Image (spheres, rainbow, N blue to C red):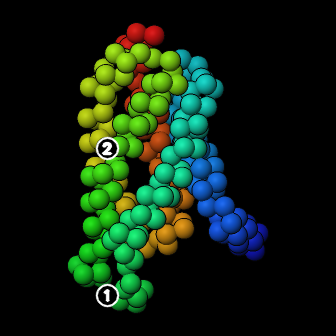
Amino acid sequence: MRQALSKLFSTYEKILAQHPLKVQSLQTAILLGAGDVIAQAFVERDQKGYDIYRTLRFTLIGSAMGPSLYLWYSILERVVGKDTSSRGQKITTFRFRKPLIKVVLDQVIVAPIFLTVLITCNNILEGKSIEDLKLRMKEDYPDILIANYKLWPAVQIINFSFVPLQYRVLFIQTIALIWNTYLAWRLNLNNTSIKQ
């Protein structure tokens, strides 16, 4: 079993090195779609029946978000620089200076944009109006952004401090399975109150 997992991971690394944007797109699409499946199956529990089109919407949005996240992490790495501390070094404030800068930039710049794009794309793919989008942004966006700030700064400090650049999107999307479940549930919570 261990050998099979090792071989699988080696294959993943090889494909990731050859096609980073395609891999990031595919894995983010799968994990965002999976978050919606979990939301529908376990959180909402047959309130409306399973909606395959909703899962496809989230999967499509994820396919576009993966490469964007990968490019963002690459930009952060170039602008802020790599954390050059060694693995054996004591944990100090200095060791976390660059990761903290990356977290602040990520949460101030990308988090609000990412959530706005996600809500807007979901609204468009649902065929909703601009008025519906304005209502959704007014009702859902502040709560989702606050929830984001409760989870992601801590996750990102780990990501930027310990995870190699090529695995950051995978790490984030693995953690994001729970977040994606929340987003899928939250973005569909008020669907019955918004005019179809």
Q: Residue furthest left?
A: 93
- At label 2, counting other C-alpha atoms closer than 10 Å, the crowd grade (few under 14, some 14-19, many 20 or more) is some
Residue 96 percent location from the top left of the image = 29, 75
Instruction: State left or right for residue 64 relative to residue 18.
Output: left
Q: Name the residue under label 2.
A: 112
| Residue at horizontal 39 percent and vertical 77 percent from the top | 82
Mark 2 vs 1: CB contact within 8 A: no
| Residue at horizontal 49 percent and vertical 63 percent from the top | 168
Q: Name the residue under label 1.
A: 90
Say if 105 sits above or below 35 in the image.
below
Residue 149 percent location from the top left of the image = 28, 49
Residue 45 percent location from the top left of the image = 53, 26
- At label 1, counting other C-alpha atoms closer than 10 Å, the crowd grade (few under 14, some 14-19, many 20 or more) is few
Structural distance between the alpha carbons of marks 2 and 1? 33 Å
Question: What kind of residue is marked 2?
Answer: Pro
Question: What kind of residue is marked 1?
Answer: Lys
Say if 178 sits above or below 94 in the image.
above
Instruction: State left or right for residue 56 relative to residue 116.
Output: right
